[in-house]
Image (cartoon, grey):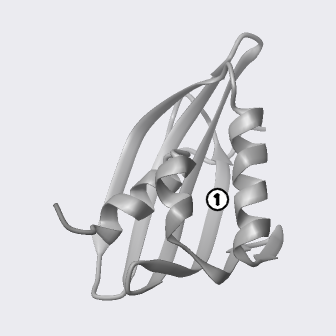
Amino acid sequence: MGFDRGDVARAFSEHRFDEALPHLARDVKWTIVGYMVLEGADAVARTCRDTAEGLEGIRREFSRCVTAVGSDAVAVDTVVRYVRPDGMTAVASCAIYEFSGEQITAITSYAVEIDPEDAGAQPPR
């Protein structure tokens, strides 16, 4: 089976980083809009590993994951609930992955916390 950029992007968006990290370009740039910019595969991989560590013991429930694949870019739109022993949060996000061949060269991520009981609602107050 050949390389599928949609599968790689979806794996990243679903926190299955081990499947996606081998496809990072050495000089990848990840812009998490309104939060930070990471430059280089090492910085992105380190953040992914830290994220995965922070998610240990937390159940993730994806109620939406829509992938749109273009010739050199992929967009992944997700809604995920993070269920912890002390409560639940939910995040709606969209990430755009730019590719050169089989390598992710740039990621732009947008995310907002939403009401975990109503995915179409505004963030909880």
Q: Nearer the viewer, residue 55 or 111?
A: 55
Where disc 1 sits, the SS reads strand
The percent coordinates of residue 27 (x first, y second) are 68, 85
Q: What residue is shown at x 40% (from left), y 61% (from top)? A: 8
Answer whether residue 120 is visible to the viewer in this image.
no
Left or right: residue 84 versus residue 98 is right
Location of residue 108 with respect to 112 vertically, above or below: below
Image coordinates for residue 122, horizontal then vertical, percent: 63, 48
Q: Quadrant of residue 121?
A: top right
Q: Quadrant of residue 3?
A: bottom left
Residue lying furthest left in this view?
1
Amino acid type indicated by mark 1: Ala
The residue at 52%/63% (across/down) is 22
Q: For the point 69% across and 32% down, which residue is it? A: 55
Q: Is residue 84 left or right of residue 119?
A: right
Which residue is tagged 1? 111
Residue 70: horizontal and vertical position, in percent?
A: 29, 83
Query: Eyeballing the image, is 70 above or below 3?
Result: below
